[in-house]
Each structure stands twice: as structure tokens, then as C-alpha cells.
Amino acid sequence: MKIHLGVDKDFHPARKAHPGLLVDDLAVVVARCREKGHEIVQDAAIEGYDRIFVSDPFGNRIEILQRKP
């Protein structure tokens, strides 16, 4: 998967709007994020999914989800 990003001179990090990435193994993603020093943020549950939030280096919120079995 590739995500293409652009640069905006008047950039302000998105605090609410964010991409959501669906993964197969959320525990692995959480472990890798923590290894790299990223803060993991929990939020309100969504039925049928486990999810976390992290911030990219520019302060944008990114949601990472895994479907519950």
C-alpha cells in the first residue's frame, strides 16, 4: 500500500479529521509504534473493531483498526 501526501504552505495538523488504516494484527502495529517511541492513544470503542490512534511526525491523527473475530 502507498499513501501519497502533499505539502501545504498554510498547513495545520488535523485534530479530528483523519485517515483510518485497517490492519490484520493490531498488536504488532502497537508494538512497533511503541518501539519507535510513538504514543498510543485509546478512544471510544467502535462496534466490531479494536482501534488505536497515533500521530504522524507533523501532528496529524491516524486511526489504526482491526476487525474483531
Image (cartoon, rainbow, N blue to C red):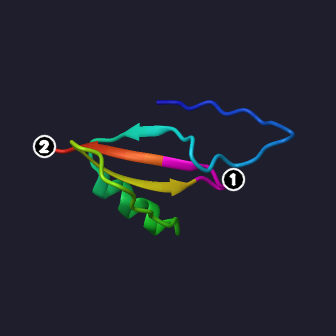
| Horizontal and vertical percent position of residue 50 | 27, 50
* Type of amino acid at the residue the image marks with label 2: Pro
Q: Is residue 8 above or below residue 35?
A: above
In the displayed structure, would residue 29 be above or below residue 36?
above
Q: Residues within 10 Å of mark 2 (few under 14, many from 20)?
A: few
Residue span colored magenta: 56-62
Please tell me in which quadrant of the rendered image residue 17 appears: top right
Q: Is residue 38 left or right of residue 32?
A: right
10 Å crowding of disc 1: few (<14), some (14-19), many (20+): few
Q: Position of residue 38 (x, y in %)?
A: 52, 65
Q: Which residue is mark 2?
A: 69
Image vertical order of residue 67 relative to residue 60, above or below: above
Q: Nearer the viewer, residue 10 or 7?
A: 10
Distance Cα–Cα, label 1 vs label 2: 33 Å
Most frequent secondary structure within the magenta stretch: loop
Q: Is residue 2 left or right of residue 57?
A: left
Instruction: Please tell me the numbered disc located at residue 58.
Output: 1
Q: Residue at x 79, y 43 (%)?
A: 11
Whichever of labels 1 and 2 marks the residue nearer the N terminus, that label is 1
Q: Quadrant of the C terminus?
A: top left
The residue type indicated by label 1 comes to Phe
